[in-house]
Amino acid sequence: MFIMKQTLSMLLLAGMVVVLAACGGKKKSKDIIAPRIVKVQPKEPIRMQPYLDERKVEWIGKTYFVTIGRQPSDSLPMVKDETGQKFVDNVFRLTVSRKDGSVFFTRTFTKKALTQYLDDDFNKTGVFEGLVFDKAEGDYLFFGASVGHPQSDEYIPLVFRLSRMGDLTIKRDTQMDSVPEDQVNANQQATDEDEGV
């Protein structure tokens, strides 16, 4: 009888320990709680700063003045990135004047003038970002240009070559060193106002 009571007491005590342990522990949930994804709403269209660069250039024995201006233009088709953010494309005006103020060459450029030098991706999602004077060499003035994906370091470099006869040729830059990088970067923060080609 005593052994039976002792065994019964032991069983009850063991049962209570199991019940208490089960009640005291936290339940583990198999549910995974992921943070709620908030879709980023595109902001107002982003535009680059206007830019104006004027410089004196000695070329073919004479003094010329090279002026390059960049102006964002709402009249051009906007470019969108993968989030739907819109970017305003730019218009550039290149003017080469003689010392007496007469104009040797002037032309306005948009990305449309560069279409044949770009691939489909940059034609669709690229912005005409930069046009800068590079050098005067022999019978030519050289300029560097770039069409790039907005807010990235992906771009297609181009070379503009202006002859002493006023003929302009454009080609893709395969050298990648014709325009110093600091000059290209400076152009990306820069002033002039114009209309598209």
Image (cartoon, grey):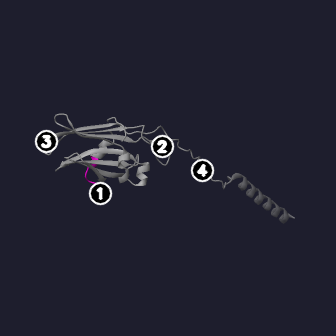
Amino acid at the residue labelled 1: Thr
Label 2 secondary element: loop
Apparent side of residue 188 relative to residue 141 in the rendered image (left or right): right
Q: Which residues are magenta?
A: 173-182
Q: Which residue corresponds to mark 3?
A: 62
The label number, if any, that marks residue 85 in the structure image: 2
Q: Is residue 179 magenta?
A: yes
Query: What is the CA distance from the residue labelled 1 to the residue labelled 2?
Result: 31 Å
Q: Counting other residues with Cα less than 10 Å from the Cα at mark 2, is it few (<14), some (14-19), or many (20 or more)?
A: some
In the image, residue 75 lies at what x, y percent?
42, 38
Amino acid at the residue labelled 2: Gln
The label number, if any, that marks residue 174 in the structure image: 1
Query: What is the CA distance from the residue labelled 4 to the residue labelled 2?
Result: 26 Å
Q: Quadrant of the C terminus?
A: top left
Of labels 4 and 2, the one closer to you: 2
Amino acid at the residue labelled 4: Ala
Query: What is the CA distance from the residue labelled 1 to the residue labelled 3?
Result: 30 Å
Query: What is the CA distance from the residue labelled 4 to the residue labelled 3?
Result: 69 Å
Of labels 1 and 2, the one closer to you: 1
Residue found at x 30% / y 46%: 184
In the image, residue 23 lies at what x, y percent?
72, 52
Apparent side of residue 165 relative to residue 146 in the rendered image (left or right): left
In the image, residue 35 lies at what x, y percent?
58, 48
The label number, if any, that marks residue 34 in the structure image: 4
> Does label 4 or label 2 sit earlier along the sequence?
4
> Does label 1 or label 4 sit earlier along the sequence?
4
Query: What is the CA distance from the residue labelled 1 to the residue labelled 4?
Result: 47 Å
* Quarter location, residue 1: bottom right
Label 4 secondary element: loop
Q: Nearer the viewer, residue 38 or 179?
A: 179
Of all residues, the one furthest to the right in this rendering is 1
